[in-house]
Amino acid sequence: MREAVIVESVRTSMIRKNGYFSKLRPDEIVSVALKEIIKRTSIPAELVDDIIMGCPSKLSEPAVEFVRLALLNSSFPNSVPSTTVERQCGSSQQAIHFAAQAIISGDMDIIIAAGVEASTSPTTKCNKEGFNTNLPREHTLRHQERAAELIADIWGLSRVQLDEYAIESHEKAIRAIKQKRFEREIVPVKVELPAGEAKIIQKDEGPRNNITSKELKQIKPTINENTKIHGGNSSFLSDGSAAILIMSNTKAKELGLKPRFRIVNRTVVGSDPNIIFTGLIIATNKALAKVGLKINDIDVFEISEVYASVPLIWLQETGADPNKLNLNGGAIALGHPLSANGARLLTTLIHELERKGGRYGLLGIGEGYGMANVTIIEKLDR
């Protein structure tokens, strides 16, 4: 049976907005990951049928120009095409889904799915203008922090619970860095500092050591003094990129490459845009049902934690084991690279499953305006 398999997956470090990557163009950031994919697998770049990439959310230039420049910057031949996908912070996860679908259908054999975020780029006119005021009355759209606050209220989550979750995210990420869990997945990026000297970046800069509940308690809430969501229990914008090499199982065998995972399921749903994040619960249940798995069959979960309330309500509703969730920290500690989010999370999921020796992994992202993507992968040659 024709299957979509994952051969390689890499990412850059996740760097805070206005940090080390702020002087790099998005095509420069992602070209590092694209080059590394070819280097690690030694496949001829001309064999790649397409490159599908999550588009930077704040790109001020035409998306088609950016992705083409990324390829040319990565020494891909002119014959390799490319395109972009925009589905909020699930953009690069959707790129992975489109790649797998093209391969399973037989249209293509080798695709690189990728994503990049450059949060320091100027915002577009669309991002500045906010919500369309002509929407039907029932759609009282909220900015995401207000939706995160609302679901915390509906599910009865206290600020203490949200803060405790945030502390755990940092602790997990610090432990992962100390144990060098990220070393194989992160490709180094050379940057030039203001003084002119070069620096190699190969470490996520977000996680904070020894963060305490007392520190978080002192942070003012985002909305008003009576609310729970604040900068300490929310993710922060970050820059970075990731790339996944996906191909058919038959092509991998023909090229003598060993597939590491197969993509078992690709699910996307729409949900209530007023509270945004419940789609993640719906998509998880739908994905598991489609492939005949139970929540306890999954060995590792990577669930986007743009706000602490999101994974906490997901845990409540799905019954997932919290000890399997975001084992190396999440976006609260490592940063939220928007359009690179899905590819980054899948890269970390792949390497963590290999480290643990687990079989199934589930990636889930709740997206703006009430959407969600879920991907299930299975480790091969266990």
Image (cartoon, rainbow, N blue to C red):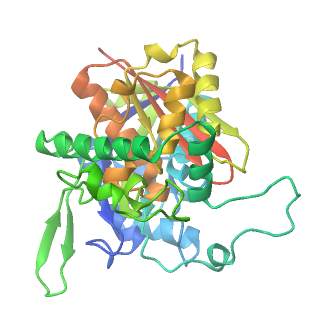
Residue 352 seen in the figure: yes
Q: Is residue 240 left or right of residue 67?
A: left
Q: Nearer the viewer, residue 99 or 219?
A: 219
Residue drawn at (14%, 86%), measured in percent from left and top? 196
Q: Residue at x 30, y 27 (%)?
A: 353
Image coordinates for residue 202, horizontal then vertical, percent? 18, 57
In percent of width and height, residue 223 lies at 55, 64
Number of dots carrying numbers = 0
* In the foreground, 181 or 378: 181
Image side of residue 24 versus residue 173, left or right: right
- Give the farthest residue toward the bottom: 195
382 to 349, vertically: above or below: above
Quadrant of residue 226 within the rendered picture = bottom right
Q: Quadrant of the N terminus?
A: top right
- State the image quarter where residue 8 is shown: top left
Q: Which residue is nearer to you in this view: 342 or 260?
A: 342
Pinpoint residue 248: horizontal percent, then vertical percent. 47, 30
Task: From the top left corner, tell me how far across and down residue 73 is, in percent.
Answer: 36, 69
For this rendering, which residue is in front, 225 or 73? 225
In the image, residue 123 above or below residue 107: below
**Residue 169 in the figure: left or right of residue 294:** left
Q: Is residue 73 above or below residue 61?
A: above
For the C terminus, which image quadrant? Answer: top left
Relative vertical location of residue 373 with respect to residue 224 in this rendering, above or below: above
Q: Is residue 89 left or right of residue 30?
A: right
Task: Identify the residue at image location x=45%, y=14%.
Answer: 296
Q: Is residue 74 visible?
A: no
Q: Residue at x 12, y 44 (%)?
A: 178
